[in-house]
Image (cartoon, rainbow, N blue to C red):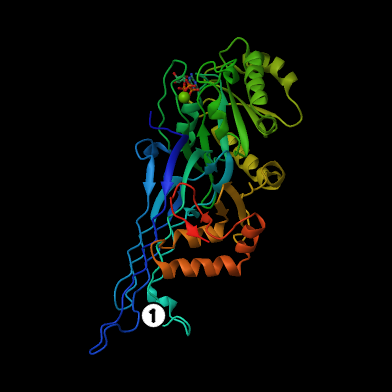
Amino acid sequence: MNFVDKVAIRVQAGKGGDGHKSFRRELYISKGGPDGGDGGDGGDIIFEANQNQDTLASFRFEKDLKAQDGESGGKSRKHGKRGNNLVSKVPLGTQIFLDGKLLFDLTQEGQSEVIAKGGKGGFGNAHFVSSVRQAPDFAEKGEPGQKYEITLELKLIADIALVGLPNSGKSTLLSRLSNARPEIANYPFTTLVPNLGVLDLSKTKSVLIADIPGLIEGASLGKGLGHSFLRHIERTKAIIHLIDFYSDKIVEDYLIIRKELTSYSKKLANLPELIVINKIDGVDQAILDKKLEPIKKELTKKTKLMTISALSGQNLNKLKEEISLLTVLKKKTSKSLAPKLPVIKIINNPDQFKVKKLSKGLYLVIGESISRFALRTDFKNDQALLRLKDILNKRGIYKELRRKGLKSGDKVTFDPDANQYLKY
Ligand SMILES: Nc1nc2c(ncn2[C@@H]2O[C@H](COP(=O)(O)OP(=O)(O)OP(=O)(O)O)[C@@H](O)[C@H]2O)c(=O)[nH]1
Ligand SMILES: [Mg+2]
């Protein structure tokens, strides 16, 4: 099956290049001025919504996305090259989740979002020259790129969804209304994944129609193909509910599908709905009227009923008019029905920090900004360590550490696994 609408993948942005440590060579001077260049930033992982893509299938074989690392800085203040971004095209309607929380919702064509940011390149030693530090003998290391395990979930953004029992003629109708050529056959569950097609209503208006695989009683309990495809109806403007005229229990057929929609979500149940009785080709009008009597009693004020033949094309122009009305209608109701999904940002103050005593004489400092400084620090270089100590002082972190009991000779770490310590 080529249609995939949910995948878990790992993304890793590029590491920042290390800053370079070097000194200008000058005639008669053993050590000239510092001239080590900065490292380049690592590349980002970017997702871009593209409407020509309609499945997440490519991610089944590509579960690890990695952007390029930045290059290290060089002598003579040479900047390292920035790592290339990795831009990955995803279908319109792709949602990106981290730990179950929605991070991004790609609902606009061409919308692109940075999913993982590349690490900043480290400063070379030329950067650290100051009035008090004439010959800095250290450079920063590049920061690691952001790394996440995310889940991608596709929720198609179609205007109209065709729903109904298997074999009711949904795919036939889609093939008549749009450019799509889905498989059609006289047995249930011909359609195994949603099909999409574009219906041109006028020069300026077109409508995206999704043919949803057939539903049966108990779909919400996993019967048949189950109800997982219903997620693709959530964002449609309206439902066309197709019913086979030749069924001898039209009302029951109708109620079965209504029940499945309702048990999936209230939102689906409340979408504008058009009931369409299909396969009326060659049927006598009197017979037709008689057969439709019972279902007319089921109609609420909101639902409309019409009859068509997807095969012969009968009443399809009328159906197109109804579709036009349904999709305009949505413009007014869409705001209340489908509020723009909020994009959750991980909010925190980067300068915040926490201090913890891990064991006797060992303390842990965590905080976005300070951890980043620590990551860029070359712990084997005394001058680099001095700079880190300076930052701890200026930010009041030493003060907090002392409050927690830090004494001379104790060790401070920024990552218990890194095996790198700052001695107080
Ligand atoms: N006579 C007649 N037959 C039709 C009409 N529409 C569809 N059919 C036939 O009904 C059968 C099922 O059509 P499909 O379009 O595959 O039905 P479906 O609803 O997509 O079925 P699933 O994909 O299995 O859910 C096919 O044999 C079609 O030729 C119609 O208007 N009149
Ligand atoms: Mg079908």
Q: Residue at x 61, y 35 (%)?
A: 234
Looking at this view, name the residue that lies furthest to the top: 248
Residue position for label 1: 135
- Residue 288 appears in which quarter of the rendering? top right
Circle 1 SS class: loop
Number of residues whose C-alpha sits closer than 10 Å to that of mark 1, classed few (under 14), some (14–19) or many (20 or more): some
Q: Is residue 137 visible?
A: yes
Q: In this view, which residue lies farthest toward the front?
A: 408
In the depicted structure, whether residue 110 falls above or below residue 316: below
> In the rendering, at what x and y percent does residue 48 appear?
45, 52
Residue 244 at least partly seen = no
> What residue appears at the point 47 percent right and 85 percent down from the top-left corner?
131
Please, is residue 156 above or below residue 360 in the view? above
Q: Position of residue 29 (x, y in %)?
A: 27, 87
**Amino acid type for the residue under numbered disc 1:** Ala
Q: Identify the residue at horizontal 43%, vertical 68% (top origin).
A: 384
The reply, left or right, for residue 74 in relation to residue 378 is left
Furthest-right residue in view?
Answer: 301
Q: Residue at x 55, y 18 (%)?
A: 222
Q: Position of residue 335 (x, y in %)?
A: 69, 47
Identify the image quadrant of residue 396: bottom right
The N terminus lies in quadrant: top left
With respect to residue 420, does 10 lie above or below?
above
Q: Nearer the viewer, residue 342 or 25?
A: 25
